[in-house]
Image (tube, rainbow, N blue to C red):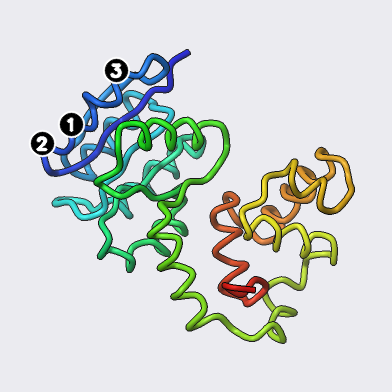
C-alpha cells in the first residue's frame, strides 16, 4: 500500500510543490495539505496519515506544538520536520516532541521521497548539514563522561555500548556484527534502552548520547 502523507507548510507555493513532487511517486500518496499547525492537527486526526511533512514556523500554531499534539493522539504517525539552514534552534525541541528527522526545504524530490520511505520503515533522517551543525553544538556543550552515572545509570554496560553505536549511525545489523551478537539481541537492547530512558525512538536516543557525553563528535 502507498505511504499516506500529509504536507504542512504555510507557504502555498512550497506546499503545493512538495505535494506534486511526492504524489507522482508510485508508493506515496499525498492525502492532504495544511497551511498551519492547527489545520495539521485536525487533518492528521481526520486523515490518519502515515507520515506528516511538517514546517516549523507557521501562524496560528507552530510545527513543534502541532507535532506534540499529533503524536499525543496518534503515536504511530511519523513526523518529518522541514527546516532551513538557519533554524537550528528548533532541532532539539522537535526531536523531543517526537520528530523522526529533518529535511532542508531545498531537498530534491528524490531526497524527500527517500526520507519518507526511510522514516516509514523505522529509520531516522537528518540532512547532512543539519547533522554537522548539531554535532558542532553538542561538542561545545556536552557534559564530561563522568556525569553518565546520572542520566544513564539504568543501562547495563552492553546497553551503553549499543546506545553509543546507535548514536554513531549504525543499523541493528551493523551493531550485531560489531558486537558479535544476533540482530534480534540488538533489537531487544534497543527496545530496553528506549524504555529505560523514556525515549520515543533512535533519534532521541542519539541526541541523548551526545548530550550526556557518551559519544563525543570526532571521536
User: 183 left or right of 73?
Assistant: right
Residue nearest the observer in this picture, 57 or 123:
123
Q: Residue at x 40, y 68 (%)?
A: 133
Q: Residue at x 27, y 34 (%)?
A: 7
Q: Residue at x 20, y 42 (%)?
A: 9
Q: Residues within 10 Å of mark 3 (few under 14, many from 20)?
A: few
The residue wearing badge 1 is 17
Q: Earlier in the sequence, mark 3 or mark 2?
A: 2
Q: Dot 3 lies on which element? A: loop
**Labels 3, 2: front one:** 3
Q: Residues within 10 Å of mark 2 (few under 14, many from 20)?
A: few
Residue 44 rendering spot, x and y as whole percentages:
33, 32
Q: Dot 1 lies on which element? A: helix
The quadrant of the rendering that contains the C terminus is bottom right
Q: Earlier in the sequence, mark 1 or mark 3?
A: 1
Residue nearest the observer in this picture, 154 or 186:
186
Where residue 24 is drawn, which disc sits there? 3
Q: Are marks 2 and 1 in contact (CB under 8 Å)?
A: yes
The residue wearing badge 2 is 13
Amino acid at each position: 500500500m502507498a505511504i499516506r502523507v500529509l504536507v504542512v507548510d504555510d507557504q502555498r507555493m512550497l506546499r503545493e510543490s512538495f505535494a506534486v513532487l511526492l504524489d507522482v511517486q508510485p508508493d506515496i500518496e499525498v492525502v492532504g495539505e495544511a497551511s498551519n499547525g492547527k489545520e495539521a492537527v485536525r487533518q492528521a486526526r481526520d486523515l490518519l496519515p502515515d507520515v506528516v511533512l511538517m514546517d516549523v514556523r507557521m501562524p496560528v500554531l507552530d510545527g513543534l506544538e502541532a507535532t506534540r499534539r499529533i503524536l499525543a493522539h496518534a503515536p504511530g504517525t511519523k513526523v518529518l520536520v522541514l527546516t532551513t539552514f538557519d533554524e537550528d534552534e528548533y532541532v532539539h525541541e522537535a526531536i523531543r516532541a517526537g520528530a523522526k528527522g529533518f529535511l532542508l526545504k531545498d531537498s530534491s524530490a528524490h531526497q524527500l521521497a527517500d526520507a519518507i520511505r526511510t522514516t516509514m520503515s523505522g529509520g531516522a533522517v537528518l540532512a547532512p548539514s543539519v547533522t554537522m551543525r548539531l554535532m558542532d553544538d553538542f561538542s561545545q556543550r556536552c557534559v564530561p563522561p563522568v556525569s553518565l552515572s546520572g542520566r544513564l545509570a539504568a543501562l547495563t554496560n552492553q546497553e551503553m555500548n549499543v546506545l553509543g553505536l546507535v548514536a554513531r549511525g549504525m543499523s541493528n545489523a551493523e551493531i550485531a556484527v560489531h558486537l558479535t551478537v544476533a540482530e534480534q539481541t540488538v533489537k531487544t537492547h534497543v527496545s530496553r534502552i528506549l524504555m529505560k530512558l523514556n525515549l520515543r525512538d533512535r533519534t532521541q536516543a542519539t541526541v541523548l548520547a551526545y548530550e550526556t557525553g557518551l559519544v563525543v563528535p570526532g571521536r
